[in-house]
Amino acid sequence: MFDLASSEFNSVRYEIYGKLLTDEPVFWYEPMQSWLVCRFDHIQQVIKSNESTTDFLIEDKIANSGDALGDGTRAVLDIVRTWMIYNDGATHTRLRKFMNQAFAKHHIDRVLPNIKQIIDTRFAQAIQGQTGPVELDIIETFAHPVPAQILQDMLGLDEISLEDFLRWSDSIALFMQDFVVSPVPNNDIAVQTALDLQAMVDAFRASIQLRKHKPRNDLLSALVTALETSEHRLTEDELCYQLIHLIFGGHKIPQFVISNTLNLLFQNPDVADKLRDGTVDIRSVINEAMRVEGPIQFITRHATTDFELGGKKIAKGESIFLMLGAANRDPLCFDQPDRFAPDLKRRNSLAFGSGAHVCIGATLVIAELQEIFDALLNSEFDLTPLYDVNAPAWTENATFHGITRMPIALQRKTASVAAE
């Protein structure tokens, strides 16, 4: 039996997905008392029906953990349960319609021109005073901080340090990674996350008060104004909690997409060449990378009624893991499913989810990733991996899928190559 919560799972992930897709695409996973649904069409069926919900995922976990659930975990869950991803029906609709304002085209367009400057500045700082190749970790220098820096710029939160953004987001990621796959969440992790979440709430409340008294030309000011003017109104606390979700999702997912995509380009230099000569475009590369090495490998639901799926009877109240990482390599839906091939015409993957809970920030994520990769790949520097690209350091369990360390050599291109 495989273990979704183990670091060893990464080395056998796609082998197991392939076996499940072939032998038992709707599989009862005893360690987590949950169904694993692997087929693309089965997942679409679950998402689009009224037979499952996200509504009581957290309550179910609390009930199953019993007395082992600590105060730290409860404090974190009091905030996490308010996120739109863990709500359905009217609550989800109200939260989503309000937060949709954050991803209006004019907000995205305002921040995109700054991305190249952010990348160029980081390159310049990395190579400052150096004449030869510079060794650095692409995660530490780019993939980790840059998405947070973009969000900070977009929201206009220059009164909050980038270091705080990064620490808070990493803290939530550590908690969520443990919470989703552990039968009983680790309360030691939760205690620190609870402290970090409270610091976030305090900082956002202070920023909201600043915008109330003196609005700026930034996204947060627009959201604060909408607290009183939107028909889908939120309370200040609800806005704080949704901002926390925005910071977390808008930082960690792009971080992992950057690392995973760059690693795929290192593994497939022919694709990198096609990018340079214009045979494939960067959007196709990003979409294909998210299919092949998606940052979110599964999402969870609970059955609201008894129903049958793939010949298995799922009972009301049972937990369901929708295995996006498996479905995106489903041979019934994708030709050569394990191949990274941006030039193949494929159907849309499930990397951003589907249905009512499709990722609200997908447009922003794709737009910023296009800018980031354009700046990375068309800079005056060559990037050479200094690690085994076929065995990188992955995150330690199956919840989030990304590379944690990517040492590279950064070297200025020769004049003739740069001119091309």
Image: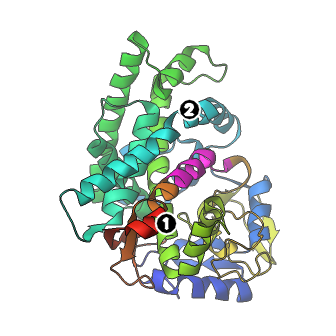
- 393 drawn magenta: no
Q: How far from the left and from the top, in percent, is residue 390? A: 45, 85
**Residue extent of the magenta highlight:** 357-371
- 366 drawn magenta: yes
In the image, residue 357 sits, relative to residue 211, either above or below, namely below
**Is disc 1 surrounded by few (<14), some (14 to 19) or many (20+) residues within 10 Å?**
many
Specify whether residue 182 is in view.
no
Residue found 37% across the figure and 77% down from its top: 385
**Is disc 2 surrounded by few (<14), some (14 to 19) or many (20+) residues within 10 Å?**
some
Disc 1/disc 2 C-alpha distance (Å): 30 Å
In this view, the mark in front (1 or 2): 2
Mark 1 lies on a secondary structure that is loop
Contact flag, marks 1 and 2 (Cβ < 8 Å): no
**Amino acid type shown at disc 2:** His
In the image, residue 302 sits, relative to residue 385, either above or below, namely above
- Residue 294 falls in image quadrant: bottom right
Q: Of helix, strand and loop, which mostly describes the magenta segment? A: helix
| Residue pointed to by mark 2 | 107
